[in-house]
Image (spheres, rainbow, N blue to C red):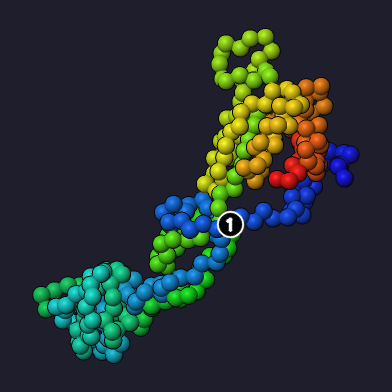
Amino acid sequence: KMNKLPLTKKKIIEFFKKQDTLILKPELVDLKNSQGRFLFEDLKSKVDLPPFNNSAVDGYALLKKDLIKKKLFYCDRRIAAGDKKNIKIKSGEAVRVFTGAKMPSNSSTVVMQENTLVNEDGIEILKVPSFGENYRLKGEDIKKNQKILFRGSKINQQNINLIAASGIRKIKVFKKIKIGFFTSGNELRKPTKNLKNSEINNSNFFALNSLLDQKFILKKYYGNLKDNLNIVKNNLLRASKNNNIIITAGGASVGDEDHLINALSTIGNIFFWRAAIKPGRPIAVGKINNC
């Protein structure tokens, strides 16, 4: 039953929340092309993060038992990020490690290079680190098969990094929602300074075209509807066959040349008409039958 009084913004939002959800099918896309799309399913990490025990800083890896006994260490070995070395530290030795480097298998403590003094014989510890300091454990941030994002999450600049770090190259996203849109009115012209009589520039096209410029939307402009009932009906029917949503700008008021309400009433159902919003009071939402 159509409303008698204009609806408030709150009531319009409540109305939309009660409607059946438009369920779109999934499609598989490359991660590099996924920004702005919505996840079709939960995502789980394919790897541990970090994937191995590593150093959080540039410094020197030490043995636990040496943290109390010694302050002077010899150092003639190093591990850089990306090295595949499997090293065990010897007593009295410090191994040079860099940020992100794989840790020696028997060490879980790193002294920052700022807290050391390098000399000809090795290094001197100026500030003794606590056991486990500057050490990142395998899987400390995320465990393999841990859920990292939920269905419906929007891919953005913040989480796309996490997805890539989790070893995922392709993801399932909802297919783009198809939206067709019209402007309406005999008086509309493409932007020009040479307007005649009652002509106005068609600014609505540019507003809608910009609003619909989203990664998850497949938009199509179907042109400007002339002020004729049959033209409005036929164009709405034509566009509805290939779109999930149709948007029109103009023609929803009560003037003799505003045909949208009559057209929609003939070929479908009007859910509500008129909103307590300025500007834009004559707004209508409905459904075209069999589409």
* Residue 42 is at least partly visible in this image: yes
- Answer few, some or many: residues within 10 Å of disc 1's Cα (few below 14, many 20 plus, some between 14 and 19): few
Give the residue displayed 66% in from the left and 15% down from the top.
199
| Quadrant the N terminus occupies | top right
Q: Could you say where residue 6 lies in the image, as x and y percent from the top left?
A: 83, 38
Instruction: State left or right for residue 156 relative to residue 136.
Output: right
Instruction: State left or right for residue 129 relative to residue 230.
Output: left
Residue situated furthest top in the rendering? 197
* On screen, residue 207 above or below 145: above
Instruction: State left or right for residue 42 relative to residue 241.
Output: left
* On screen, residue 192 above or below 277: above
Q: How many marks?
A: 1
* On screen, residue 105 above or below 178: below
Q: Amino acid at mark 1?
A: Lys
* Residue 281 is at least partly visible in this image: no
- Mark 1: which secondary structure? loop
Quadrant for residue 289, please give it: top right
* On screen, residue 110 above or below 29: below
Q: Mark 1 — residue?
A: 25
Give the residue displayed 43% in from the left and 72% down from the top.
46
Quadrant for residue 139, please give it: bottom left
- Which one is nearer the viewer's eye here, 120 or 229? 229
Give the residue displayed 16% in from the left and 81% down from the top.
74
- Which one is nearer the viewer's eye here, 120 or 289? 289
- Which one is nearer the viewer's eye here, 178 or 73? 178
Quadrant for residue 194, please give it: top right
Q: Could you say where residue 162 lies in the image, as x and y percent from the top left?
A: 44, 63
| Quadrant the C terminus occupies | top right
Give the residue displayed 78% in from the left and 22% down from the top.
257
Residue situated furthest left in the rendering? 120
Q: Could you say where residue 253 lies in the image, as x and y percent from the top left?
A: 79, 28
